[in-house]
Amino acid sequence: MSGLVELIGTSEDDNTWRSAINSLGKIDKDNSVAISALVDLIGTFQDKNTQRRAAVSLGKICKDNVVAIATLVDLIRNSDDNIARWQAADILGEIIKGKHFVLALSGLKDCLNSEVYENDFNRYKDRYPIIWVCAQNMTYPDFYQAWHTQPTNSPIPDNHRQNTDIPTLLKQLQSTDKTFPVPLNIRALEGETDISAIAQELCTQLYQAIFPTDTDIPAIRNAPEFKRLIPQLKNRLQKPHIALILHSCPCENALSSFTRKLADSQMGIHIAWITDTPLELPLTGFAADGEDVLEAVQDWIGGIGA
């Protein structure tokens, strides 16, 4: 495999490097080594023909791979090559499924505006079909949340970003038929011991994450008052369960105690922490530097209510 990539980078013969890229597209479906090689080609080679052929081969061997999808989104967002953007959009429309619609939507929505329409219609036209596919395959709450999420400059979730940019990574979480995930950056609560302050901050962030245009955020003081809001929230989301994923703050005693009181599977409120601190039930913990943390959290969400 590495020999094919090296051949592409060093050969001056067009037929040789074209054959090498095509060969990568004939490897077994979802072969991680081949996918990684093609992703590297798209990201590191500035030659337009190389990027185009690598994108085509990528579409042939990956079914629903998050790195491949993020790479195609990145190509559509940033390439100056009309043909490469069109190819990437066409391929993305064929392979994207399930939990990865939110990744495409959050990565491309910022280009779907009147300014792009008037000044660069081709770029607008390349993105519109993917946005439409996302709209057809996502629930309204999921689409709304993704549309109001700030896009990252580069959505490719490689291992480095998994370990160093948890807030960006968790924005890719996808809801299920039963559960709506809500990542909350609670950095502001570090060192906080006042229960009323903890309750209000979590409530405020929850409302802002789910309903960013709402200005009527309830005033609460404790876990029981917080839990009284859950039925109304579930009704608005049309989901029987809400999963809070707390991150960017140490799981200190006051926070741990409060969230244990708040978590209630019977009421449909589930809480996970991204932390290395050992947790007691009913809380769930995921290590920030663990492999495939996004996949692990998504699997946890998928198991809620099953």
Image (cartoon, helix red, strand yellow):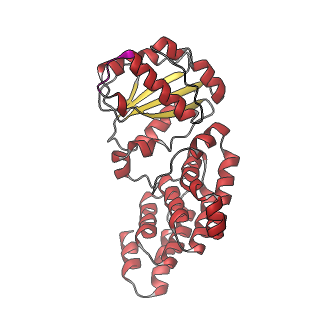
Query: Which span is picked out in magenta?
Result: 191-195
Q: Is residue 165 above or below residue 298?
A: below
The quadrant of the picture occupied by the N terminus is: bottom left
Q: Position of residue 99 (x, y in %)?
A: 56, 44
Q: Is residue 48 above or below residue 42?
A: below
| Rendered residue at 34%/17% (across/down) | 194
Name the main secondary structure of what is drawn in magenta: loop
The quadrant of the picture occupied by the C terminus is: top right
Seen in the image, is 29 located left or right of residue 177?
left
Q: Position of residue 122 (x, y in %)?
A: 64, 70
| Rendered residue at 59%/51% (across/down) | 105
| Rendered residue at 55%/40% (across/down) | 174
Residue 304 visible to the viewer: no
Q: Is residue 158 above or below residue 54?
A: above
Depth order, front residue of 143/11:
143
Q: Position of residue 179 (x, y in %)?
A: 57, 30
192 within the magenta span: yes
Q: Residue 272 occupies which quadrant of the picture?
A: top left
Residue 244 visible to the viewer: yes
Query: How many numbered marks are there?
Result: 0
56 within the magenta span: no
Depth order, front residue of 235/294:
235
Depth order, front residue of 199/93:
199
Q: Position of residue 291 (x, y in %)?
A: 36, 44
